[in-house]
Image (cartoon, helix red, strand yellow):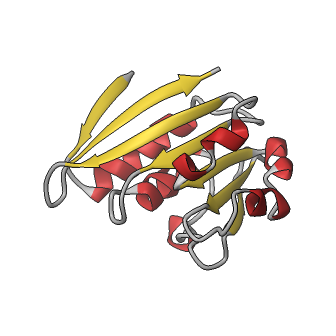
Amino acid sequence: MKRIISNSTAETIRLGERFARSLKKGDFVALIGIFGAGKTYFTKGVAKGLGYKTIKCVTSPSFTLCNIYKGKRGIRLYHFDAQRLGKPAELFRLGLQEAADGIGIIEWGDKILYHLKNTPIIKVVFKVIGKNKRVISFSKRI
């Protein structure tokens, strides 16, 4: 497991941007962490790394449950939020299968990992250790 310390939201965005370079179509990423841990800022960085023009438009899908972005590389970024789901199966109705056509990022991904047990997934865990400081850990399940 690789661990990186981020000291600011700007660093978290840059980390997401660098992380995006390693992603390819069909990848799924589960973001795990408490409210305010940096999951959406990280996703803004991923979008930037995929060539999305303005990351201001990248927002938490808390109420929409799924936002879709298309970057310059032609890869769609499916940004899901599993926090408000009554049942994990609802995420599949929102288009989780279609995300295999692009890259799927799932905030609160720990709520549905069991349902993706046959899907390779990259887990990114955010731990708050200070007002602006986070430990961000990466692991891959095959």
Q: Residue furthest bottom?
A: 63
Q: Residue furthest left?
A: 130
Query: Is 4 displayed left or right of 63 in the figure?
Result: left
The residue positioned 71% from the left and 50% from the top of the image is 72
The residue positioned 75% from the left and 29% from the top of the image is 118
In the image, 14 versus 137, the foreground residue is: 137
In the image, 16 versus 113, the foreground residue is: 113
The quarter of the rendered structure image containing the N terminus is top left
In the image, 129 versus 50, the foreground residue is: 129
Query: Is 38 displayed left or right of 120 in the figure?
Result: left
The residue positioned 36% from the left and 33% from the top of the image is 137
Q: Reply above or below: 75 against 83.
A: above
Q: Percent from the top left, x then y, of residue 31?
A: 50, 48
Q: Reply above or below: 68 against 111.
A: below
Query: Is 56 displayed left or right of 68 in the figure?
Result: left
The residue positioned 36% from the left and 65% from the top of the image is 35
Could you tell me how many numbered marks the image carries? 0
Q: Reply above or below: 115 against 82.
A: above
Q: Percent from the top left, x then y, of residue 92?
A: 81, 56
The picture quadrant where one finds residue 69 is bottom right
Query: Is 39 displayed left or right of 30 in the figure?
Result: left
Q: Percent from the top left, x then y, of residue 37?
A: 33, 57
The picture quadrant where one finds residue 116 is top right
The quarter of the rendered structure image containing the C terminus is top right
